[in-house]
Amino acid sequence: MRGLEPPRPYGHTDLNRARLPIPPHPRAVGHCSPATIGRVSTEPLRTLLETAFPDATELDVVDRTGGGDHFQVVVSAPSLQGLSLVEQHRRVYQALADPLADGTIHELRIRTKGEA
C-alpha cells in the first residue's frame, strides 16, 4: 500500500530499482582493443554466401551501421526460384549459421529473389 511506505528519495522510481547493468558486447571481452571492436569486413559473409549460392546473379552484403554487426544481405539466384520467402530466408540463415551463432551478426536484414 502506497500510504504506508516511507517517502522515497528525490528522483527514485520503480524503474530505477529494476535496472540491471548492461553486459559488455561479446567481442569487447578479451584481447580486442577499442579501435578494433566492431570492425568486421563484409568479405567473410560474402564468401559464405557465394559458397552457398554459386548460381547467384546478384549478391550484396552491406554493413548498415558501420559497427560490423548489423548487415543487409541481397541474394538473387535461380536456385531460389519456386521456394517460399520463408524457405529462401532459411537458406540464407543456414549459409550464415556460424557468424549468427558466435555473435558476429547481431542484426540481419534479408532480401531474396528467385530468378528463372
Image: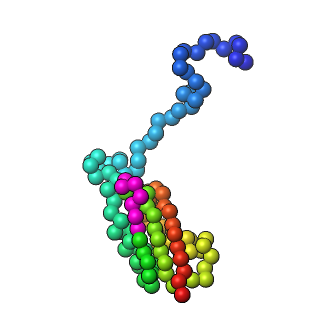
In the rendered view, tell whether residue 20 sits above or below residue 35. Answer: above
Q: Is residue 101 visible?
A: no
Q: Going by the image, does 43 lie left or right of 97?
A: left
Q: Quadrant of residue 42?
A: bottom left
Spot occupied by residue 64 in the image (x, y as percentages of width and height): 41, 58
Q: Out of 10 and 21, give the one closest to the viewer.
A: 10
Q: Residue at x 61, y 71 (%)?
A: 86
Q: Going by the image, does 98 lie left or right of 31?
A: right
Q: Is residue 24 magenta?
A: no
- Give the residue furthest to the bottom: 116
Spot occupied by residue 87 in the image (x, y as percentages of width and height): 59, 74
Q: Residue at x 40, y 50 (%)?
A: 26
Spot occupied by residue 57 in the image (x, y as percentages of width and height): 44, 82
Please state the total of marks drawn on the protein image. Answer: 0
Q: Residue at x 48, y 57 (%)?
A: 107
In the rendered view, tell whether residue 60 sits above or below residue 41. Answer: below
Q: How is the image coloured?
A: rainbow
On-image quarter of the N terminus: top right
Q: Going by the image, does 76 lie left or right of 24?
A: right
On-image quarter of the C terminus: bottom right
Spot occupied by residue 71 in the image (x, y as percentages of width and height): 43, 61
Q: Out of 81 and 49, give the one closest to the viewer.
A: 81
In the rendered view, tell whether residue 109 sits above or below residue 92. Answer: above
- Give the magenta range: 61-67
Q: Going by the image, does 111 lie left or right of 14?
A: left
In the rendered view, tell whether residue 15 sits above or below residue 88. Answer: above
Q: Residue at x 46, y 68 (%)?
A: 73
Q: Is residue 81 visible?
A: yes
